[in-house]
Amino acid sequence: MRERERVFVDSAANVFSPTSITAARVLLIELGGAAYDVLLPLAGLDIMPNVGRLIESAALVRLRCAGPLSASAVWATLQSGGGPDVHGLLDDHYLDHHRQRIVPAHTDPLRCPTLAEVVTAADREAPAVRLADVPSAAAIWKHKPSDFAELSRGIARTETALRGAVADARRVDRSTDWRLLQVRFAVLDPLLHRLLPKH
């Protein structure tokens, strides 16, 4: 495997700037719940050949986070290149003082520019496009499967959701002169939360 560019993102500063983006087009694939140390052997064994080809030619981005962070904070770090001290998102929920209740945190808007905003500012003619399968992920894995048949049905629905996200990305690729295409596959994350024992 050839040496790839390695980008380390930590909370010291926002690493995304117009001068740091040199590629003509960037495809950012976000695989929530898919650990790199699990994907690598599967790709090497040719069980996931497409992932193997991507790993061969892709940049490797490792997020360096200080302490345990919520999923929302980690996604915000990936979107912005900065840690919670930069983007301002600490947890999946926050206390809304005006409404006097706890509400879900949203990754937009952040306190700092996202990669998509930086790309758009650098080139207004070439858009940044973001696709996500989050709604389907939540619908498929609402609870832990009660038996193997229910697990099999959920896996089949997961495969359909993943194929749908890929089809959407291909449609965008054919119809849009994009500079940044972000495709977020989040359907694996809730599956892991339902299957793995809680610590």
Image (spheres, rainbow, N blue to C red):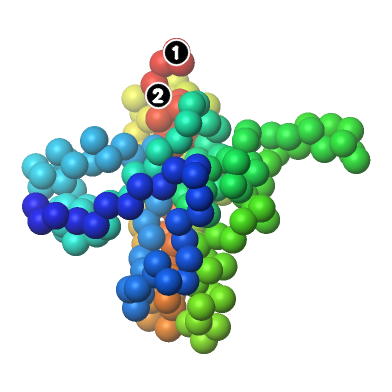
Q: Is residue 2 visible?
A: yes
Marks 1 and 2, how far apart in space? 12 Å
Q: Residues within 10 Å of mark 1 (few under 14, many from 20)?
A: few
x and y percentages locating residue 133 in the rendered image: 49, 52
Q: Residue at x 9, y 42 (%)?
A: 45
Q: Nearer the observer, disc 1 or disc 2?
A: 1
Q: What residue occupies the far front of the structure in this picture?
A: 12
Mark 1 falls on what kind of element? loop
How many discs appear? 2
The quarter of the displayed image where residue 5 is located: bottom left
**As drawn, 80 above or below 27:** above
Give the left or right position of residue 155, taking residue 116 as reference.
Answer: left
Q: Is residue 188 visible?
A: no
The kind of residue on which mark 1 rests is His
Front residue of 172/179: it is 179
Q: What residue occupies the far top of the structure in this picture?
A: 199
Mark 2, residue position: 195
The quarter of the displayed image where residue 59 is located: bottom left
x and y percentages locating residue 106 in the rendered image: 66, 47
The quarter of the displayed image where residue 175 is located: bottom left
Q: Residue at x 62, y 56 (%)?
A: 112
Mark 1, residue position: 199
Mark 2 falls on what kind of element? helix
x and y percentages locating residue 160 in the rendered image: 39, 52
Q: Residues within 10 Å of mark 2 (few under 14, many from 20)?
A: few
Q: Residue at x 65, y 53 (%)?
A: 110
Q: Residue at x 45, y 13 (%)?
A: 199
**As drawn, 132 above or below 22:** above
The kind of residue on which mark 2 rests is Leu
